Amino acid sequence: MEESPAAQNSALIKTLLRKGSLKQDIYKVTFDSFQQVRIEARQIIEENRTTVNQGDKRIAFEYQLKNDFGTEITFGSDVLIFLMHSNIFEFSRDHEVMKTPYVKEDPSRSYCGMITIFNFLSDSFRYNRLNDIGYMIGRVFINKDKHYFIEGKKEIGQLYNNFSTSILDLAAIRQIVESAMLYTINFDLLTPPFDNMKEVSLGEMQVALDSMPMKTGKRLGFKFQADTDEMK
């Protein structure tokens, strides 16, 4: 027996209100958490800037607020950009998070906001090298209860990933930011393969001399070693 138009309309409105309210709640939790990420990132810079300057004044150590959804810190030859996505996501059905008792008990816990962490070279910004490559080194998922899950490389991916118990408090945020910085410092720039660089046209060289558009990235021309093994 088909549902009446009134029943269908009622189901539509109920679903809209349920999911709409859930996503608004998650957005608020994610936005508030991102503000704490900004505060912790700025405090790390401010707390250590004097020590860094005393050690070597040539080493950049700066914090910059980009907009409501972006924060940038520069340290040495690297830049980390923290971005909050304005939308809400759900894990795919085959993701390990979906198999946990925590999510099975309440499926709405699988809906999350997302904060991503990108690494660029500071010279890419300094010289406006728009062709340079940046890398996403981690992303943080936060649900309605402020429980979080991290996907990332090495130091970042090895942080607490027990979605059912991990709360994104100030201590966790500080650890995420510091771990991202440590990973970035140890993630060195490698020379591209010689055969990829040995030929260049006169036009390309003239443009390079004018604007330095040569594409640069920490692993340009290389694959990440054991990429799949590092992702958690």
Image (cartoon, grey):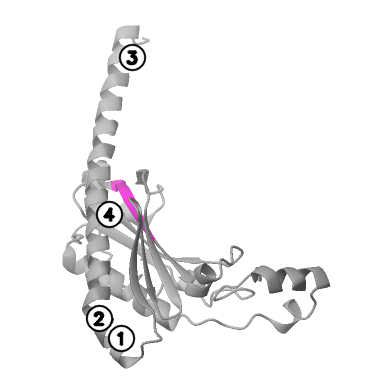
Identify residue type, mark 1: Val
Classify residue 208 as left or right of residue 162: right
Q: Are marks 2 and 3 in contact (CB under 8 Å)?
A: no
Q: CA distance from mark 2 to mark 3?
A: 60 Å
The amino acid pointed to by label 4 is: Thr
Instruction: Identify residue for label 3.
Output: 8
Q: Position of residue 119 (x, y in %)?
A: 45, 69
Q: Secondary structure at mark 1?
A: helix
**Residue, far bottom:** 55
Q: Secondary structure at mark 2?
A: helix
Viewport quadrant of the N terminus: top left
Please tell me whether residue 157 is drawn above or below residue 192 in the rendered image: above
Residue at 53% from the left image edge and 81% from the top image edge:
189
Q: Is residue 106 magenta?
A: no
Measured Cα–Cα span from mark 4 to mark 3: 33 Å
- Is residue 4 visible in this depiction of the protein? no
Name the residue beneath numbered marker 4. Answer: 100
Q: CA distance from mark 1 to mark 3?
A: 64 Å
Q: Earlier in the sequence, mark 4 or mark 3?
A: 3
The mark found on residue 228 in the picture is none
Neighbor class of circle 3 (other Cα within 10 Å; few <14, some 14-19, many 20+) is: few
Q: Which mark is residue 52?
A: 1
Check contact, mark 4 vs mark 1: CB within 8 A: no
Label 4, residues with CA under 10 Å away: few <14, some 14-19, many ≥20:
few
Give the magenta part as a residue range: 110-116
**Mark closer to the observer (4, 3):** 3
**Is there a contact, CB below 8 Å, between mark 4 and mark 3?**
no
